[in-house]
Image (cartoon, rainbow, N blue to C red):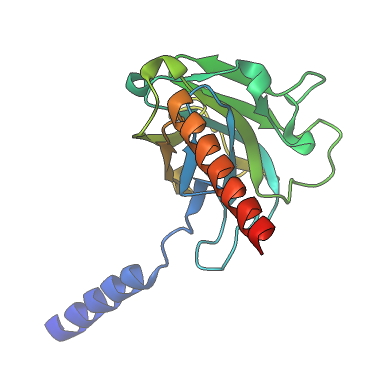
Amino acid sequence: MFQRKSFGIILVILALVAVPAPASLTIGFDQSTYEAQPGQPFQVQVHLDADPNTPGNQPVAAGLYSMGVRVYGNDSLGFYTLGTDSIVVPPELDCDGFDGPAEKASDLGSLGALGVLPSEATEGYDGTLLMTVTLVPDSSTGHGGFYSTLTLGEFFQNPSYDDFLDFACNSLDSQLEFGTAVVHVVPEPSGLFLILIALLSFARFGRRRRRKTLA
């Protein structure tokens, strides 16, 4: 009798172990590293990947109904945004669920969007692009030469609100994994450096002309 109970317990444990974990839904950037110059805007794309084990970004199987995501920058290194106009949501998700556009937010240190399919939609969003944002390294921080990290998170930091739903209205928030990216703000060429480059180029051009004349 004891052996049968023990065998049954082992089977239950093995069955629990064999249950596959929920597939992760990765929210990440289109690049792992960006290069930018102080005062010069650059674009960052945010994508979803419903199957990290398959090459490339894969859409949600049932299609996406809603999404809400934010990009966070490092304020100590002087990133700023161009306001909500710098946030672009794919047309399919550029809606609040009724007749208005997607909700957008541009706060100190973060910017993001909450997009929903329009009420007349008959199928889920089968793309992977969630939004495109424009960031600007503050030129007042100097000539650059530093690194900063961009991170991602849900639009609403509220466990009672579901940012990501598929077209069958299943919550995907518990499956979310957020990626990061590095921004390398490269130094701007100084005025003296540009003058030296111009003089060197002129000198090389002059030497070539003299050689041709002598020949």
The residue depicted at 41 percent of the width and 61 percent of the height is 21
The image shows a total of numbered marks equal to: 0
The residue depicted at 55 percent of the width and 36 percent of the height is 198
Res 13 quadrant in image:
bottom left
Q: Is residue 80 left or right of residue 126?
A: left
Near-viewer residue (190 or 41): 190
Near-viewer residue (72 or 211): 211
Res 112 quadrant in image:
top right
Above-or-below relation of 54 to 119: below
Image coordinates of residue 153 in percent, x first then y, are 45, 34
Screen quadrant of the C terminus: bottom right
Image coordinates of residue 87 in percent, x first then y, are 64, 26
The residue depicted at 47 percent of the width and 27 percent of the height is 160
Q: Is residue 19 left or right of residue 163?
A: left
The residue depicted at 45 percent of the width and 44 percent of the height is 174
User: Is there any visible trace of residue 67 in the rendered image?
Assistant: yes
Near-viewer residue (209 or 176): 209
Q: Is residue 101 left or right of residue 37?
A: right
Image coordinates of residue 99 in percent, x first then y, are 82, 20
